[in-house]
Image (cartoon, grey):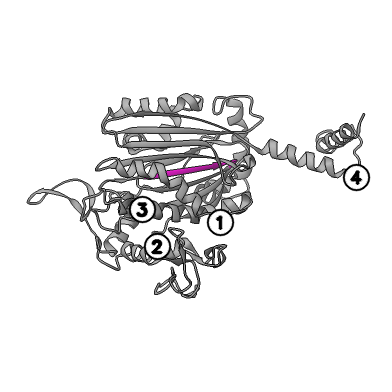
Amino acid sequence: MNRKHLAQEKVTCVLNMASREGRRRHHDLVPLAALLSREMKNEKMEKPTVRYGNAAQSKKGEDYFFINTDCQHVPGNPSTTFSVFAIFDGHNGNAAAIYTREHLLNHVLGAVPHGLGREEWLQALPRALVSGFVKTDKEFQRRGETSGTTATFVIVDRWTVTVASVGDSRCILDTQGGDVATLTVDHRLEENVEERQRVTDSGGEVGRLSIAEGVELGPLRCWPGGLCLSRSIGDMDVGEFIVPVPYVKQVKLSNAGGRLIIASDGIWDAVSSEMAAKSCRGVPAELAATQVVKEALRTRGLKDDTTCIVVDIIPPDNKVEPSSPPKKQNKWRALLFRKKSRVSASKLAKKLSTVGIVEELFEEGSAMLAERLGNNETSAQSTSGLFTCAVCQVDLASSEGISVHAGSIFSTSAKPWQGPFLCAGCRNKKDAMEGKRPSGV
Ligand SMILES: [Zn+2]
């Protein structure tokens, strides 16, 4: 037996200690090579398989999607690979949806500081997503084209799922126990009271379409513009309080994995989150999206563009297809039951994280840039010694940058001379989004 084999033998011993205790003697000293090999083995064990499928039925031709399972946050380093799944449901034309599909990922990655490890990169994502969304909106509006789009942008990095979303293209998570969680909020004026308040506070008017004296029609809309959504990318012809600042949620799945269903409102206007999840349980990801679209069409017919992406995050040792085995569900029920006895029922109902299925790492939905870009001074400084605009990433001379906190009611803890900083253009945009200057200026 050569040294290498010996090292591996020792690792096997250590790894088996718990299960085979007493049956085998283990060595007290583990050579470095063995430790490294064990680390690598753990890394490998920890990496889930990602499988996906997508389906669409077009009515207006304004739904677009984006799938890339081979992105790297450190280019050239395969161990930094992550996947992106996104849906863009355009309105008043398709230009904004197409532009966002082409540029959003790059704008998000451009806002992540270089040279980060996995944990740091995941932590940097929520803020980078805000920057990327706002930048995409600003750049698209500069082109002077009409149209707008929803954007639901999902990053899957091993067990961590980060979702950023404006509009009403929902992303849900179906865990193996049958619990369905929504990872987005619908930015619709009709249902979202908070957003209605924000729009009104910023100077927008919310009301229904008036077809005759006293006769109103359809969902609540925002005027000027008449949009039913309170957030979107594009839409230069509506009030600027229709903002591109995304709701962001980041969760870590348990090692049982889970299924994501991302879809445009063509699905959600026809079926509930629970119905969508149920309609494709036991069906492999590759076919599940077709199943969900079929279910929506069966319920409501083809009234709107209908697009769906299903993503399965599958544990590496999972021999069976997700959600097909009753055996797995029993396992979950056992776990749920075990935890249930320890926490109160009300606590349990509050969040999925309390039952240990999903760990919530981050959640923030504020439309205020000052709240979303934080107080991080260090990341505002680029390597060249210049400051960088926290939104569009252009370099600024030290005299040019305007703190995101300047003149803000949120500046109580953050000093107005501290970063992050914005360029004049992004500062203008921020003010407009908060209703501090008339829109369209
Ligand atoms: Zn800028």
Q: Which residue is mark 1?
A: 113
- Residue 328 on the magenta span: no
Report the disc number at residue 101: none
> Residue 61, percent across and down?
29, 33
Foreground mark, 1 or 4, reads: 1
Q: Is residue 41 above or below residue 431?
A: above
Q: Which residues are magenta?
A: 151-159
Q: Is residue 407 above or below residue 371?
A: below
Taking the image as drawn, is residue 208 in sight?
A: yes
- Residue 157 on the magenta span: yes
Please tell me which residue lies in front, 390 or 62.
390
Q: Is residue 27 above or below residue 421?
A: above
Tell me the chief SS of the magenta region.
strand
Taking the image as drawn, is residue 261 in sight?
A: no
Is the residue under label 2 in contact with that under label 3 (CB below 8 Å)? no
Indicate yes or no: mark 1 CB to ligand 1 under 8 Å.
Answer: no
Locate the C terminus and report the quarter of the image it occupies.
bottom left
Q: Is residue 188 above or below residue 376?
A: above
The mark nearer the N terminus, 3 or 4, is: 4
Q: Quadrant of residue 255?
A: top right
Report the disc number at residue 368: 2
- Other-residue count near label 4 (Cα within 10 Å), few / some / many at <14 / 14–19 / ≥20: few
Q: Residue at x 30, y 68 (%)?
A: 436
> Residue 16, percent across and down?
82, 35
Q: Quadrant of residue 92?
A: top left
Report the disc number at residue 29: 4
- Other-residue count near label 1 (Cα within 10 Å), few / some / many at <14 / 14–19 / ≥20: some
The mark nearer the N terminus, 1 or 4, is: 4
Q: Amino acid at mark 2?
A: Met
- Please, what secondary structure does the residue beneath circle 4 have? loop
